[in-house]
Image (cartoon, rainbow, N blue to C red):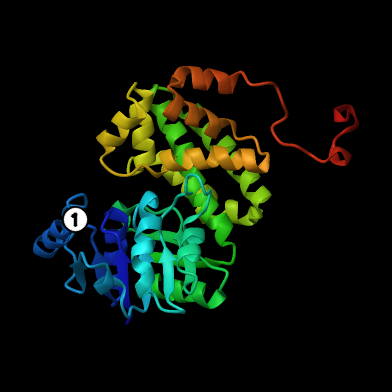
Amino acid sequence: MADIAMIGSGTWGTGLARLLSDNGHIVRMWCPFQEEADLLTAKREHPNLPGVRLSERITFTADIVDAVTAKDLIVMAVASPYTRPTAVKMAPYIEEGQRIVTVTKGIEDGSFKTQADILEEILPGAVVAALCGPSHAEEVIRGLPTTIVAASLNRQMAEYVQDIFMSPVFRVYTSPDILGVELGASLKNVIALAAGMADGMGYGDNLKAALITRGMHEITRLALKMGARKETLSGLSGIGDLIVTCASMHSRNRQAGILIGKGLSMEEAMKEVGQVVEGVYSAKAAVGLAKKYGVELPIAAEVMEVLFNGKSTKLALSDLMLRERRMETEFPEEELPESWRE
C-alpha cells in the first residue's frame, strides 16, 4: 500500500484516484479551491463523473503542503497550463528523490517543454515519469479495461509506476522513451481538433481516416527529429492515443473541434466544452517546434490558423487538399524502381 498525492481534481485525476484506491492505496487529492475540496468530501462524487462514488481511502485538501508532504508518489494531474505554477508552489516541500509521475498531456507554449521537462526544471531533485496512452476518465473510473504506458529514463521509476497502477482492468507497459511517449500523447490532441472540425463540417469517415493517418505522419516526423523512437509512436501513446482521441465523444479536443467546425470560435468552443482543451495550447507549441526543427506539419499549421488567426475551417481543408502533389511516403532513392528515380 502506497501513500499517494493526486495533484489536480479534474476528471482524469479523479478517475485515476478511484483506480488507485481500488488498488488498495491511500490517495490525498489536492484541489485548487477549498469549496471544491469541501464539495468532494461531502458528496464523494465528481460533478462531471456522476454515478461513481469515491472510496473513503480518497481524501481532499486545498493545502498544497498537506498534499505533497511525505508521499510515496506524487501524481501531477493538473491541466497543462497549470503544471508550471503548481510545481512552483510544490517546490519548497519536495525532497530529494521524490517520485513524481505526470499524467497530463501537453507541450508548454513558449518553452516547448513537455510536462516531464517542466517538472525536472522546477523540481530537479525529483525522479520523474510520464503515464500516457489511450485512456478516458469516463471509462477508467467505471473500471473498463484500459492499457497505458509508464515512461521514464529511470527504469526503477517506470517499473514502480507500473506496479502502483497495474490492475486487472488497467494494464501498464513500461518504456525508456519518455520524450516519444509525451510527444505522441500531446500532439495527437492537435490532430483530434482537426478530426473534430471535419465532423462538425459534416464530412465522413474517409476524411477522418486520412487526418488520423497523415496526422500520425506529422507527429512521427517531428518526434523522430527531436530524438524519439519510431516504435514509441506506433504504440499506445502514439497511434493508440491518436485513434481514441479522434474517434471518441469523451474527447474534449474532438468535442471542441466539432463545435469549431459548426462555426463557433475557439473561445466559444472551449467555453461550451467547459474543461481545458489541451490541443489548443499544444497547437501553438507544435507549430513552434516545427519551425525550430525544420519539419513540415501541414495539419497542425492549418489548425493553428483556424484557432488563432480566424481562418475558416472550409478554407483550411481546401488548402490541405490542394497542397502540391507528392508521394505518400519518402523512400531512399536506391530502393525506388528505376522509373521513379530522378
Relative to 79, does residue 327 appear above or below in the rendering? Answer: above
Residue 13: x and y, percent?
A: 30, 60
Q: Residue at x 51, y 60 (%)?
A: 117
Relative to 273, does residue 156 appear above or below in the rendering? Answer: below
Residue 261: x and y, percent?
A: 38, 24
Q: Quadrant of the N terminus?
A: bottom left
Q: Residue at x 50, y 63 (%)?
A: 121
What amino acid is at disc 1? His
Residue 60 lies in what quarter of the image? bottom left
Residue 12: x and y, percent?
A: 32, 56
Q: Is residue 142 left or right of residue 82?
A: left
Q: Nearer the viewer, residue 307 or 12?
A: 307
Answer yes or no: is residue 34 visible. Answer: yes
Q: Is residue 262 left or right of residue 31?
A: right
Q: Nearer the viewer, residue 255 or 152?
A: 152
Residue 227: x and y, percent?
A: 66, 55
State the residue lying farthest toward the right.
338
Q: Is residue 90 left or right of residue 244?
A: left
Q: Quadrant of the C terminus?
A: top right
The total number of labels drawn is 1
Mark 1 neighbour density, 10 Å: few (under 14) some (14–19) many (20 or more): some
Question: Which residue matches tag 1?
Answer: 46
Relative to 5, does residue 85 appear above or below in the rendering? Answer: above
State the residue lying farthest toward the front.
92
Q: Nearer the viewer, residue 279 or 287?
A: 287
Q: Nearer the viewer, residue 332 or 74?
A: 74
Q: Residue at x 75, y 37 (%)?
A: 330
Q: Residue at x 38, y 37 (%)?
A: 254
Residue 34 lies in what quarter of the image? bottom left
Answer yes or no: is residue 234 visible. Answer: no
State the residue lying farthest toward the left.
42
Q: Is residue 209 left or right of residue 21?
A: right
